[in-house]
Image: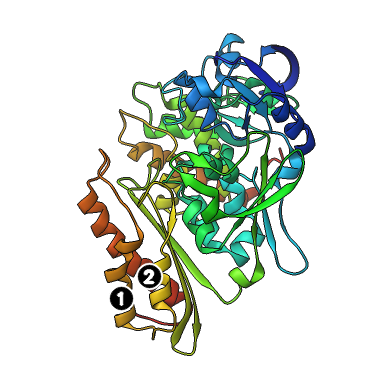
């Protein structure tokens, strides 16, 4: 049940030897991407959220063979040359992190949400709904929502000052 | 690691049918959000998989020239929410899809899986029932078309033969043109929850009377159910407060809610009556009759 697959992880092309019985989270963690956390392992908590072709999904409910030919993003890849991504920085600024276990999954959910809603008007309710797949038992979510609001505001300001800088991924 | 005995990947529907024919124990895996949870719980019935995750032809949502909408069984809930064909013509289905799980689950889970696993709580089922959806199944010999309400046979049981693939859900133009339809899910939380009761209502008017009404519920019986008796009684009724009263008084005759740890039967019955009235109100409102 062994297969060779090729994919991109955080922009780097890799070839992986995987067992068809493995979930994506198992393969990512085995290969050192330990920001991806195993919480419920049943699609309830979102701690294992990664982006596959920029779409957030639960890597515990995703077979590793399904990423063949696709592009994966995890929280460690969002920090580029030591510089935190806008979402990561906003989480830090707003104090949206307590124990930290849910944070990498939430960062990826927020990253996808901000990229999707950049330039549009977004209500608090939509932010909440956009993060409904991620459980956090410490923060009460309020600071997480503020962090996402800050990101969307900063992006709007930046777009206004410099013109759209949205990267095409 | 999931405890699998066999795994085969299909690239086309034909390949999937051939693989299923070779192994009667094999079941299709599409989005994985139900099958992999079962495997995580070490369920013995899910150990032989035919992988249809990447079968592109199953993901299409198309409208044929006569207005028939074909929703591919492999379409994810996110794609049901985003497809212009669906949001422009049968928005009740995207309304249903938007209530499923959370964003991650909606990006993975498919409408075909939601129907084929046969659960009474499927969020796509009530909208599809009031749209008179027909299940399209392909097997080794032939293609079958089964109305969705007949496809459901019991809790967790549907009319899919072991070597068949549900390829699409077909919605005829006469089942959505001139119809107004709405769906509401009553649950304890706004997301990541299983419906306590789900209700879809669709109506079409002639003058100030109801020329036809369709009402469907989830978690109100062993399978998602249509309310045939109530629908018959409402035919030709004037669309006013007495219609709402009629529906409220009649709807429990069509349903079989039960006690469970999620909610007692009496509570479900109360919610059923309330939703029947309110969701119908919303559907009527959409075709210009305000009873709110």
Do the residues under discs 2 and 1 have CB atoms within 8 angstroms? yes
Q: Do the residues at discs 2 and 1 belong to one chain?
A: yes
Left or right for B139, reference B240: right
| Labelled disc at residue B230 | 2
Q: Count up the numbered dots.
A: 2
User: Percent x, y for residue A82?
Assistant: 58, 19
Name above or below for residue B142 compared with residue B7: below
Q: Is residue B168 left or right of residue A102?
A: right
Q: Which mark is residue A17?
A: none
Q: How is the image coloured?
A: rainbow
Q: In terms of depth relative to the viewer, which is nearer, A60 or A103?
A: A60
Vertical comparison of B144 with B165: above or below: below
Which badge, 2 or 1, is on the more N-terminal residue?
Answer: 2
Q: Quadrant of residue B23?
A: top right
Residue visible at 27% across and 41% down in the picture: B262
B57 lies left or right of B277: right
- Which residue is rendered at x = 44% and y = 79% of the image? B235
Image x and y of residue A17, in percent: 71, 10
Chain letter of disc 2?
A: B
Q: Is residue B73 visible?
A: yes
Q: Position of residue B112 (x, y in %)?
A: 59, 44
Q: Quadrant of the C terminus of chain B?
A: bottom left
Other-residue count near label 2 (Cα within 10 Å), few / some / many at <14 / 14–19 / ≥20: many
Whether residue A155 is situated above or below residue A40 in the rendered picture = below
Of residue B143 and residue A168, the one placed in the foreground of this image is B143
The quadrant where residue B269 appears: bottom left
Looking at the picture, tell me which residue is in the foreground, B145 or A146.
Answer: B145
Label 1 chain ID: B
Q: Is residue A37 visible?
A: no
Secondary structure beneath dot 1 equals: helix
Residue hosting label 1: B246
């Amino acid at each position: 049940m062994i297969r060779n697959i090729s994919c991109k992880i955080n922009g780097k092309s890799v070839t992986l030897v995987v067992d068809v019985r493995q979930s994506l989270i198992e393969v990512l963690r085995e290969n050192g991407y330990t920001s991806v956390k195993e919480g419920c392992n049943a699609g309830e908590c979102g701690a294992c959220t990664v982006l596959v072709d920029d779409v957030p999904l639960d890597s515990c409910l995703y077979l590793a063979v399904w990423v063949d030919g696709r592009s994966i993003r995890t929280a460690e890849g969002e920090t580029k040359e030591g510089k935190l991504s806008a979402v990561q920085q906003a989480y830090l600024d707003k104090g949206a992190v307590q124990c930290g276990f849910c944070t990498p999954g939430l960062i990826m959910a927020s990253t996808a949400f901000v990229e999707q809603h950049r330039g549009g008007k977004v209500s608090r309710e939509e932010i909440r709904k956009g993060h409904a797949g991620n459980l956090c038992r410490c923060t009460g979510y309020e600071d997480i929502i503020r962090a996402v609001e800050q990101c969307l505001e900063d992006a709007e300001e930046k777009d206004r000052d410099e013109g759209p800088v949205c990267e095409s991924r | 690691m999931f405890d699998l005995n066999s795994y085969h990947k299909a690239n086309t529907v034909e390949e999937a049918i051939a693989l299923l024919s070779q192994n009667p124990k094999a079941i299709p895996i599409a989005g994985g959000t139900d099958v992999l949870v079962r495997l995580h719980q070490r369920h013995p019935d899910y150990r032989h998989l035919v992988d249809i995750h990447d079968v592109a032809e199953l993901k299409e949502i198309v409208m044929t020239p006569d207005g028939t909408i074909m929703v591919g069984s492999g379409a994810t809930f996110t794609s049901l929410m985003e497809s212009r064909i669906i949001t422009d013509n049968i928005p009740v289905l995207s309304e249903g899809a938007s209530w499923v799980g959370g964003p991650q689950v909606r990006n993975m889970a498919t409408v075909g899986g939601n129907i084929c696993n046969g659960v009474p709580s499927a969020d796509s089922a009530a909208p599809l029932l009031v749209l008179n959806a027909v299940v399209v199944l392909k097997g080794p010999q032939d293609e079958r078309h089964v109305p969705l309400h007949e496809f459901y046979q019991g809790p967790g049981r549907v009319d899919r033969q072991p070597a068949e693939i549900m390829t699409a859900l077909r919605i005829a133009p006469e089942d959505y043109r001139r119809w107004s339809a709405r769906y509401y899910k009553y649950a304890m939380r706004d997301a990541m929850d299983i419906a306590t009761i789900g209700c879809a209502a669709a109506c079409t008017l002639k003058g100030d009377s109801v020329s036809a009404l369709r009402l469907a519920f989830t978690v109100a019986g062993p399978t998602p159910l249509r309310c045939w008796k109530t629908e018959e009684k409402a035919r030709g009724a004037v669309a006013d407060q007495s219609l709402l009263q009629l529906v409220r008084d009649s709807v429990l005759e069509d349903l079989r809610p039960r006690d469970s740890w999620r909610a007692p039967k009496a509570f479900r019955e109360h919610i059923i009556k309330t939703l029947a009235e309110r969701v119908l109100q919303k559907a009527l409102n959409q075709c210009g009759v305000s009873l709110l």
